[in-house]
Image (tube, rainbow, N blue to C red):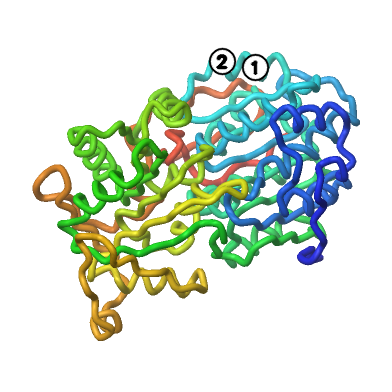
């Protein structure tokens, strides 16, 4: 079933939400639901399986949190230790934390308990919260598997499964785990997938997990928000540093998010900007969880103006008032471009997205334009503009190489893909240990680490019997 042309409701009061939820919405100053919220909330409150596709920043989190809270409140079942009634899976720690932030605000006047378990965080507080019992569990797959193997999470009371940023979950290699988790739930349960994009590779997962789903779209796949002004800056690679300084000087005191391809470049550019007198910090997969949280809080409070980040952190950055996004490197994957610039212009605000493009990157720019189905205006009114002829543009193929000379001589060269190069290979183990002895199958074999700092073992996630 495709739900695409449903007229949007104009007020939250028209969505038949219970009074405590309406009060929480009013307390946050919201009156008008976004398109994805007005279309999705009624279907979810009816208990239907849903595929929700919406441009990033469209309010997807509240779209599934509001009906989930209402259904749990109306069901009025007491929480049970280690048996969550609803499970929300997120691909990264930052996204999980953002979901927790939304839950905290919207459940303010409800007796609903929730907790968040992610890799890179201490296990003991997570054990404590789970043993006390929660209605809603927000988790990253690797850490959830740790808890299942230890017996601290059991699925026999779980009747709702929500996958946020489902495409990113698959990009990080969690396909088998997600399927086995879903298969471990009771037969009768609601499954919901939300994402800004839904590539064809996800179709198999949809077929496996969802039953007669309602498909809700508010924007074409790989499209960008209309309220974000996009500009391309033609510049030689060696002048990108000077161009960034030029742009920052034109936006004094405004929140600016700068994207790099690799962790090393992220740190190097952050250090160079700090030496230039900027209030700046960096965030990427190698940062410890407490450091990443501290940096994000500084950015939210306005203690820093510039945040340098990598793609793996992009979808977890939900900060109001980001005025400018700067792509120092053009991402080779057009979907990453969509997610990057989606950090500005959120919740119907306006924003600017500036992409630096060297002559060697023109092919990548053209591929992005083709994917988003629009031309990006070339900004020539700056001191570092370099002309790229039509002949040069036609001769350039999309280029994945990334040589840099910012901050230190030399620089790194490599593909810099978001999954491979921004993985948290140096993170600590995700609290793995012996099984709690609940009779469930454990992960074994080789171990690897994902972008959440979680240990992952073999892919097969054995089905578990309810304890």
Of residues 129 and 173, the one drawn nearer to the viewer in this rendering: 129
Residue positioned 20% across, 61% down in the render = 384
Q: CA distance from mark 1 to mark 2?
A: 6 Å
Dot 1 and dot 2 residues touching (CB under 8 Å): yes
In the rendered image, the vertical position of residue 397 relative to residue 57, given as above or below: below
- The N terminus lies in which quarter of the figure? bottom right
Q: Is residue 156 visible?
A: no
Residue positioned 32% across, 49% down in the render = 260
Is residue 85 rendered to the left or right of residue 114?
A: right
Residue positioned 48% across, 49% down in the render = 172
- Residue 463 image position (x, y, % from top left): 67, 41
Q: Residue 125 has which mark?
A: 2
In the rendered image, the vertical position of residue 199 relative to residue 79, given as above or below: below
Q: Residue 392 has which mark?
A: none
Q: Is residue 443 visible?
A: yes
Is residue 43 rendered to the left or right of residue 200?
A: right
Q: Residue furthest bottom?
A: 391
Q: Secondary structure at mark 1?
A: helix
- Residue 144 image position (x, y, % from top left): 59, 32
The quadrant in which residue 221 appears is bottom right
- The C terminus lies in which quarter of the figure? top right
* Mark 2 surroundings within 10 Å by alpha-carbon count, few (fewer than 14), some (14 through 19), many (20 or more): few
Mark 1, residue position: 129
Residue positioned 19% across, 36% down in the render = 276
- Residue 162 image position (x, y, % from top left): 70, 43
Q: Secondary structure at mark 2?
A: helix
In the rendered image, the vertical position of residue 110 relative to residue 144, given as above or below: above
């Amino acid at each position: 079933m495709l739900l695409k042309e449903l007229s949007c409701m104009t007020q939250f009061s028209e969505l038949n939400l219970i009074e405590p939820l309406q009060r929480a919405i009013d307390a946050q100053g919201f009156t008008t639901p976004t398109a994805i919220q007005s279309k999705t909330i009624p279907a979810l409150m009816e208990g239907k399986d849903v595929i929700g596709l919406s441009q990033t920043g469209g309010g997807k989190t509240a779209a599934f949190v509001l009906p989930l809270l209402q259904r749990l409140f109306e069901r009025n079942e007491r929480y049970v230790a280690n048996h969550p009634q609803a499970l929300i899976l997120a691909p990264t720690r930052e996204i999980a934390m953002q979901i927790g932030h939304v839950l905290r605000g919207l459940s303010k006047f409800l007796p609903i308990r929730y907790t968040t378990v992610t890799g890179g965080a201490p296990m003991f507080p997570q054990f404590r919260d789970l043993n006390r019992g929660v209605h809603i569990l927000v988790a990253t797959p690797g850490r959830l598997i740790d808890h299942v193997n230890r017996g601290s999470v059991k699925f026999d009371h779980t009747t709702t499964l929500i996958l946020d940023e489902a495409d990113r979950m698959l990009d990080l290699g969690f396909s088998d785990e997600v399927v086995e988790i879903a298969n471990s739930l009771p037969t009768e349960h609601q499954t919901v997938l939300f994402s800004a994009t839904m590539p064809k590779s996800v179709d198999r997962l949809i077929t496996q997990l969802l039953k007669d789903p309602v498909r809700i779209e508010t924007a074409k796949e790989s499209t960008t928000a209309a309220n974000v002004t996009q500009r391309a800056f033609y510049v030689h690679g060696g002048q990108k540093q000077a161009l960034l300084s030029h742009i920052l000087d034109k936006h004094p005191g405004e929140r600016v998010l700068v994207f790099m391809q690799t962790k090393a470049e992220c740190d190097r550019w952050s250090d160079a900007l700090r030496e230039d007198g900027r209030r700046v910090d960096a965030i990427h997969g190698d940062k410890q969880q407490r450091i990443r949280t501290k940096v994000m809080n500084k950015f939210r409070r306005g203690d820093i103006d510039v945040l340098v980040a990598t793609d793996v952190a992009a979808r977890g950055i939900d900060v109001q008032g980001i005025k400018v996004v700067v792509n120092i490197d053009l991402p080779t994957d057009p979907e990453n471009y969509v997610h990057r610039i989606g950090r500005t212009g959120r919740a119907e605000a306006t924003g600017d997205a500036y992409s630096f493009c060297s002559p060697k990157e023109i092919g990548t720019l053209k591929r992005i334009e083709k994917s988003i189905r629009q031309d990006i205006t070339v900004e020539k009114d700056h001191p570092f503009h370099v002309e790229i002829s039509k002949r040069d543009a036609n001769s350039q193929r999309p280029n994945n190489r990334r040589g840099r000379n910012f901050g230190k001589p030399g620089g790194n060269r490599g593909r810099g893909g978001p999954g491979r190069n921004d993985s948290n290979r140096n993170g600590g183990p995700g609290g793995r240990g012996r099984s709690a002895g609940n009779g469930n199958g454990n992960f074994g074999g080789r171990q690897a680490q994902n972008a959440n700092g979680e240990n992952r073992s073999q892919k097969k996630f054995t089905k578990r019997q309810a304890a």
